Image (spheres, rainbow, N blue to C red):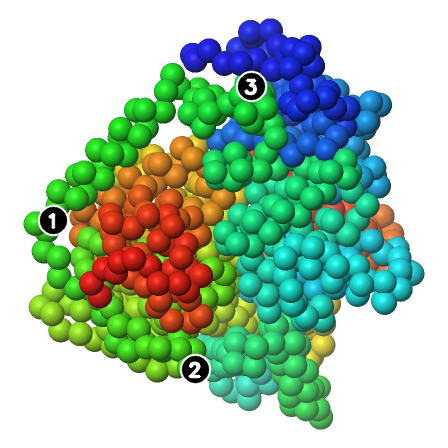
């Protein structure tokens, strides 16, 4: 076991995070909670000071979400103490907790699709028979909150189902901040936002710090943690393993604490090795599998032409709403482009136009959606059912399932992808986000795809699982599968892909070669500026 | 503060106490799933203890016959509910099948030809229920309710002026406690129900369409993206539902012996009652026919019990209503998002 900095409150008082010691707003001591046999939290300690931005980090399954649910009054702790502004507090239900001034933005973007933006912002504040406030006040409050978060225009009467995922997430943040809050909890609350939106939300949070308001957030993005937080607390396997002011910690130290390993070098070395292996496969027939011809995503946008080769990982990037999502949806005909076409190229080089989603699937183009909960998972069903549901179209004799063959493929896949799912009969909704994603990916991998279209597949997935999946994607590519990989994380795109297609205002603004491109090149292209170099189309 | 260097195992109690089991929210769904299976024997023992002279072969077979009618009628309902719909036309289809059988049999048609005609009708009704729901983008609740009115109207029109009709005598013995099935000393409808139940459970577990019914009900959007044949799935569920309603209607003809378009009426809600009491969620995607079979037995036992104790029909409905609410709230406490790790 690695030596870790144990959290010692006495010590942290000796070394205050800033010049003067701050008053502690929230103190969590030895909180534990189990679900059946699973011990989600064993001994969680946490101290959030007034006016502090505090990052709570840990791998999936480390107990972050459980702790946040306890602090939000959603579930009670089994044991331990909670102190809220110096007094013992119960946190017995969400309403009381909100009244105390804790506002939570949960990982799931919970909006009511049929209600307007305004109603979604103020949902839950009304009594049964009377409105909590006048409509005029709601309009002012909601638009102020949304403007504070950096959206200049959002029609408050629009129904929530017309919003993009990012806009929905901003609505849930607005919902939290219209309440009189002293502590704002963001559980992966900015994961759907693109870089510029996230920065504006961060600016807002920083500005609130001077008013003595505190923020507790979780994130799987290390750059975000170091950019925003004043203090970091690390959870591992349900315990607080360390807590330090952000200036005292290196990214390396944090990774070591999270994973419990002596060092993260082995992780990085493994990733390096895999990428070398992938690059070494250059000899593999790099024929085209997919050709995009003069595809126009929106009226007035310039046409897009490019080719996707066997074994290639193509990155897709752009700020929110710039056409990159439309592009990947067009690739599998989930959306009809204004003009142009997508061709599937067979091994002899003949092209066949893709007209429908069924067509795309027939040609081995498989799509993994962005919104796991609403578009991917069958929540009430088991892990195995979720994995095998598409597979049954192949594995049946006159409609009767060939279960043994499916079980074999499941075992094969779970070994290859390092799936941690417990028993295969377990309900899929009890898995962590990363393992759910592996199941959804496996659904198509088991079908031997030619092209995988992945729409932001690593959203809300922890660092270790990410590394697993990077390696797994590379191994899929080295077996000749072409992968289209849409992501909001530039570092990820640079590490994993060969080329990055950057979208701006509905057209392909730049096609960058990942080896030569830098962070800055990609960001510049995202904002519509000319990058320094282009890859060949 | 728990800062001693204990391992996670040392902190855990050596064995889960009853107290911790009861307190644990995650264990509740496991227990609640067993409720219908426990309720069936408990209610039976209760019947035996409270109704004098109840424990004999004839009473027990009567109980099973009663359950078989409901069990057969709610077999297809289970599938439509799991697929995310609900079939409100079952009662009307039962009535129509009963009338067609008794009228045509009295008119001299051979029994099996009438059954063939009924099967064709069931395919038509089920397909229209499902396809109109898919094409018009309305919940099957609405299309099948419309169908219920149409079929009920036709049945009433057809039976108008005829008060006679007849059923084959062997069909009557199929639904009588003294009936036999070949060498087995059990009436035909009970044997038919058991066979149908085994087939239905196997169908839901072991066939592609069975699994796709679950997928469609669990998440229609994800089902479409995973290339599950949702439309075909819905058609299959509603056709099976109409078929089962017809079969129950045919058995009813043996029971009543004359044309009566109202035979199905109590089943309008009872099929849903059996499904819900068994623990199949009306939200779709979870449950199964084994549970509905238990639900049918529970409804039959409760009815027998209340009749045996001399309560009238309104009291029976009251008790069933309370049971639905109590059980539904017990099942409702399934693993929630909040309990996820």
Residue drawn at (67%, 28%) of the image: B24
Residue drawn at (37%, 45%) of the image: A492
Q: How far separated are the C-alphas under marks 1 and 3?
A: 44 Å
Question: Whole-percent x and y of residue B71?
Answer: 60, 58
Quadrant containing the N terminus of chain A is: top left
SS at mark 1?
helix
Are the residues flagged by discs 2 and 1 in contact, CB closer than 8 Å? Answer: no
Q: Mark 1 points at which residue?
A: A282
SS at mark 3?
strand
Quadrant containing the C terminus of chain A is: bottom left
SS at mark 2?
loop
Question: Whole-percent x and y of residue B68?
Answer: 60, 57
Q: How far separated are the C-alphas under marks 2 and 1?
A: 38 Å
Q: In this view, does B224 lie above or below B8?
A: below
Q: Name the residue under label 3.
A: A242
Q: Mark 2 points at which residue?
A: A299
Question: Whole-percent x and y of residue A49?
Answer: 72, 27
**Residue closest to the eye, A116 or A225:** A225
In terms of sequence position, does the residue under pointer 2 or pointer 1 come before the other? 1
Q: Kindly tell me whether residue A173 is visible in this rendering.
A: yes
């Amino acid at each position: 076991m690695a030596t870790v900095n144990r959290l010692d409150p006495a010590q942290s008082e000796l070394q205050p995070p800033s010049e003067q010691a701050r008053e502690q707003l929230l103190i969590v001591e030895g909180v534990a909670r189990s679900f059946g046999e699973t011990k989600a939290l064993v001994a969680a300690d946490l101290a959030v000071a007034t006016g502090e931005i505090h990052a709570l980090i840990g791998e999936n399954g480390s107990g972050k979400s459980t702790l946040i649910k306890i602090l939000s009054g959603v579930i009670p702790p089994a044991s331990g103490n909670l102190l809220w502004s110096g007094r013992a507090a119960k946190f017995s239900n969400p309403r009381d907790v909100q009244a105390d001034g804790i506002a939570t933005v949960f990982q799931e973007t919970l909006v009511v699709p049929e209600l307007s933006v305004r109603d979604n912002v103020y949902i839950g504040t009304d009594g049964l028979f009377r409105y909590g406030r006048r409509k005029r006040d709601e309009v002012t409050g909601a638009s102020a909150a949304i403007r504070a978060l950096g959206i200049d225009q959002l029609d408050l009467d629009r129904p929530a189902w017309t919003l993009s995922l990012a806009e929905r997430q901003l609505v849930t943040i607005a919902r939290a901040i219209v309440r009189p809050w002293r502590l704002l909890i963001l559980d992966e609350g900015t994961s759907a936002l693109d870089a510029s939106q996230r920065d504006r939300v961060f600016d807002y949070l920083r500005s609130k710090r001077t008013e003595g308001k505190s923020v507790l957030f979780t994130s799987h993005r290390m750059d975000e943690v170091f950019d925003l937080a004043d203090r970091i607390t690390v959870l591992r396997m349900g315990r607080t393993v360390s807590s330090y002011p952000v200036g005292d910690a290196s990214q390396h130290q944090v990774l070591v604490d999270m994973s419990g390993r002596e060092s993260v070098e082995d992780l990085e070395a493994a990733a390096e090795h895999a990428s070398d292996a992938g690059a070494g496969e250059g000899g593999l027939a790099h024929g085209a599998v997919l050709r995009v011809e003069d595809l126009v995503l929106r009226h007035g946008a310039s046409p897009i032409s490019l080719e996707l080769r066997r074994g290639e990982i193509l990155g897709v990037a752009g700020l929110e709403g710039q056409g990159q999502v439309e592009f990947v949806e067009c690739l599998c005909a989930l959306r009809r482009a204004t003009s142009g076409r997508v061709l599937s190229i067979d091994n002899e080089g003949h092209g066949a136009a893709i007209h429908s989603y069924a067509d795309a699937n027939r040609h081995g183009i498989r799509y993994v959606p962005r919104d796991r909960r609403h578009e991917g998972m069958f929540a009430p069903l088991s892990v195995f059912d979720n994995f095998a549901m598409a597979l049954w179209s192949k594995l049946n004799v006159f409609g009767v399932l060939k279960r043994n063959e499916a079980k074999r493929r499941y075992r094969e896949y779970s070994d290859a992808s390092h799936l941690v799912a417990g028993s295969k009969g377990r309900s899929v909704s009890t898995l962590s986000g990363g393992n759910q994603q592996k199941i959804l990916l496996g659904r198509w991998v088991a079908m031997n795809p030619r092209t995988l279209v992945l729409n932001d597949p690593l959203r809300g997935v922890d660092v270790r699982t990410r590394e697993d999946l990077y390696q797994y994607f590379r191994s899929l590519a080295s077996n000749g599968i072409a992968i289209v990989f849409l992501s909001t994380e530039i570092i990820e795109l640079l590490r994993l892909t060969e080329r990055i297609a950057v979208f701006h205002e509905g057209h392909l603004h730049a096609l960058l070669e990942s080896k030569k491109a830098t962070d800055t090149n990609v960001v510049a292209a995202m904002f519509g500026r000319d990058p320094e170099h282009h890859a060949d189309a | 503060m728990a800062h001693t260097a204990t391992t996670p195992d040392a902190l855990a109690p050596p064995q889960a106490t009853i107290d911790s089991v009861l307190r644990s929210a995650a264990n509740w769904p496991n227990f609640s799933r067993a409720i219908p299976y426990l309720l069936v024997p408990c209610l039976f023992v209760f019947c035996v203890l409270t109704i004098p002279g109840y424990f004999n072969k004839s009473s027990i077979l009567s109980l099973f016959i009663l359950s078989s009618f409901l069990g057969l009628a709610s077999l297809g309902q289970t599938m439509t509910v799991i697929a995310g719909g609900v079939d409100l036309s079952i009662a009307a289809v039962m009535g129509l099948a009963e009338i067609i059988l008794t009228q045509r049999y009295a008119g001299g048609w051979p029994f099996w030809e009438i059954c063939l005609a009924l099967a064709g009708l069931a395919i038509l009704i089920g397909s229209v229920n499902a396809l109109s729901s898919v094409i018009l983008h309305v919940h099957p609740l609405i299309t099948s309710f419309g169908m219920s009115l149409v079929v009920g109207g036709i049945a009433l029109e057809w039976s108008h002026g005829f008060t006679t009709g007849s059923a084959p005598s062997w069909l009557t013995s199929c639904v009588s406690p003294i009936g036999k099935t070949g060498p087995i000393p059990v009436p035909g409808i009970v044997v038919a129900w058991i066979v149908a139940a085994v087939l239905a459970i196997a169908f839901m577990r072991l066939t592609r369409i069975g699994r796709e019914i679950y997928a469609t009900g669990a998440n229609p959007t994800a089902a479409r993206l995973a290339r599950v044949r949702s439309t075909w799935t819905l058609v299959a569920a509603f056709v099976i539902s109409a078929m089962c309603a017809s079969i129950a209607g045919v058995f009813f003809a043996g029971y009543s012996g004359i044309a009566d378009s109202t035979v199905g009426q109590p089943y309008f809600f009872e099929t849903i009652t059996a499904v819900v009491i068994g623990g199949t969620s009306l939200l779709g995607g979870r449950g199964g026919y084994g549970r509905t079979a238990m639900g049918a037995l529970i409804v039959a036992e409760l009815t027998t019990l209340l009749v045996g104790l001399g309560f009238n029909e309104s009291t029976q409905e009251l008790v069933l209503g309370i049971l639905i609410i109590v059980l539904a709230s017990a099942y409702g406490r399934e693993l929630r998002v909040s309990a996820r790790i």
